[in-house]
Image: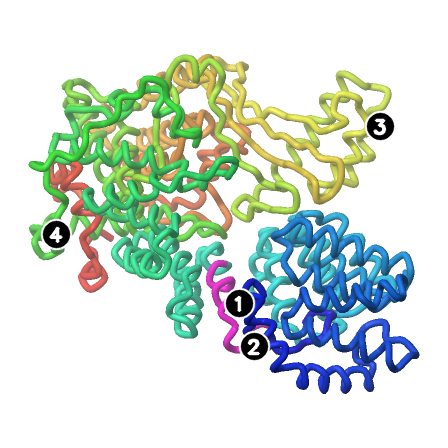
Amino acid sequence: DSSFLHFHESDCDIGGSSSCESMLSLNTEKILSQAKLLAEQKRFPFATDNDNTNEELAIAYVLIGNGLYDEAIRHFSTMLQEEPELVSAIYGRGIAYGKKGLHDMKNAELALFELSRVISLEPDHPEVFEQRAEILSPLGRISEALSDLTKAIQLQPSARLYRHRGTLYFISEDYATAHEDFQHSLELNKNQPIAMLYKGLTFFHRGLLKEAIESFKEALKQKADFIDAYKSLGQAYRELGNFDAATESFQKALLLNQNHVQTLQLKGMMLYHHGSLDEALKNFKRCLQLEPYNEVCQYMKGLSHVAMGQFYEGIKAQTKVMLNDPLPGQKASPEYLKVKYLREYSRYLHAHLDTPLTEYNTDIDLPGNFKDHWAKNLPFLIENYEEQPGLQPHIKDVLFQNFESYKPDVQELICVADHLGSMMQYETPGFLPNKRIHRAMGLATLEVMQAVQRTWANSKVRMNGKTRLMQWRDMFDIAVKWRRIADPDQPVLWLDQMPARSLSRGFNNHINLIRGQVINMRYLEYFEKILHFIKDRILVYHGANNPKGLLEVREALEKVHKVEDLLPIMKFNSKTRDGFTVNTKVPSLKDQGKEYDGFTITITGDKVGNILFSVETQTTEERTQLYHAEIDALYKDLTAKGKILILSAELGEVDAVCNLILSLVYYFYNLMPLSRGSSVIAYSVIMGALMASGKEVSGKIPKGKLVDFEAMTAPGSEAFSKIARSWMNLKSISPSYKSLPSVSETFPTLRTMIEVLNTDSSHCLKKTIVVV
């Protein structure tokens, strides 16, 4: 589809010039007859009025078409000696230099020099600007290439030129402008599957998944065997959280080409995050048969093995990724950065497979700097780091446990856990259901319920090698333990257990809501709420610091309906010209009238499409202590009320206990004390503690709602309790929960935990769950 003529490429290898010469002599007649035809029809650029000149030019163009670039350059050069400003020869020589290969900088410079000469002699020919852009873009000179294509479009717009320019805007991550160009291209020629695919990708990268899906489907209508469109469609469905539709699209891509590595990789990743580790492994193994050095597949293969307790295979795959050192000056891949942490953590897990979970604590055992670097995703440069011991042969890998091999009451426990875990699923774009996490967090919920009941009945628990009364952190630690083992890729660590130096600097949990043109679909539901809050804070700020300009600011704020509408308001104030930060406040229950810092909202940027809109919580030591005091007081109150509740199940008491549980978790969410996984961990604690009080959550989390963001954007703990209760649909607990076996005694070690997460429970669907 280039603006230059198409000839079949010859098999002549330019490097072995002797064979080329012999081929040339063989093909002279053929070349001359092709050239004669070309000259007669003037089917080459900048043909002249002189027939003899045209024949000479045509010969050189035919040489280019046959891949004989050096011969063509020589031929054009001879002509230019006689006629230095023969435009067609200058242009042809530029093309030949470009075709010789831009990997040699000299060729690129000569090609650009020749094409620039043509432009100075003949400034009104769009194809010359396009050819120059084709040479500039692979050299990374994108802005120059863009201005050449813009010039070509001004001279003579075409579907191809718009598509070419759209592709360059796409590479530059200017998705909105790229989208406009693909749209123009499709208006001029609607049957372009590639332009349609790219149009879909401009939506996809901006988080507009439904629009992306429509475009990918349109591309497939135009080209039914378009593998890349099926692959992209699968990826868009995966981002939406639609597992079945994504699977179907990936399958269609693989039916067209079973060796399509990118699809195998993406499908494997999706299966891993869906909790189907066995299936994921098959895809990664196939991917590595085709591409043995594929780092993503190698890393994911190692991770899948370790998650299933197959440590020997897992560590072997991880070591292969570690051997893949980046070249000097080359950026290390995310897999290379993560793999050393995973290997060390895998060795630690393996060594503890059979140690009772009550006798050790991962947060204490792992070295501080290791945890700090891992949670921050930093390169593995840790001074004086002592590696975890290698695998000990007497500790065997985890073996697969058949569901039927568990006793009936344990089978019941697993099925109930699967059901409870599914109640925690977010119905929001970007959250793929993960049945492994569902099971783990369902078991966590039941273990929390059992531990809280024991505590309210004055029993002690055994944690970290000590027997004592349970504290609030122990309750959360139950859920942390299960969340950690469900996906060992993610460092789920307590931030206050990090080294003191790291804490004094503050540890940030950072979420981009909008970065440039990329919108984070997961949090879309909260944009308006956060925007409303920002507008209030701006008024308060100007009321205090700029009372004269308050009216003007108020009027401007009335026109603000989207985040980018705030940009002009930044100009009102020298301090906020480049952006501003706003802190939310969390009211104290313990000390009425006192407020703590919630999360920080930051907006920076100078124009639409160049905005950073983000939220973060900063975990400093001082902030942590304030929140801990709040949670301690609530937990003390909760334990006292729980003990009364066990003796007399009065309705008022149940209500008070329910509010205390939700208030306690409200502060946990605002504190964000874990490096990962806080959201589902806290929700399983809510469900488990409520069950201990005799209440079961029977309502699902509403579409678009995220429990952590509900807590973070609620004006206080009461408001959060009210919102959460509105969907939880609390019912009295079924008595059959009492007869379930103890989770901590049934799964006392990492080995038993991994076994139960691996076991297939499709039988649960056949059995009707007794607990209703």
- Residue in view at x 41 percent, y 61 percent: 261
- Of mark 4 and mark 2, the one earlier in the sequence is 2
Q: Quadrant of residue 451?
A: top left
> Could you say whether the residue bearing mark 3 is in a helix, strand or loop?
helix
**Discs 1, 2 touching: Cβ within 8 Å:** yes
Per the model, the C-alpha gap separating discs 4 and 2 is 46 Å
Can you say whether 621 is above or below 420 in the image?
above
**Mark 3 or 2, which is nearer the eye?**
2
Q: Is residue 54 left or right of residue 376?
A: right
**Mark 4 or 2, which is nearer the eye?**
2
Q: Which residues are magenta?
A: 218-235
> Could you say whether the residue bearing mark 4 is in a helix, strand or loop?
loop
Q: Is residue 176 left or right of residue 620?
A: right
**Mark 1 or 3, which is nearer the eye?**
1
Question: Label 1: which residue?
Answer: 229
Question: Label 4: which residue?
Answer: 401
**Discs 1, 3 touching: Cβ within 8 Å:** no
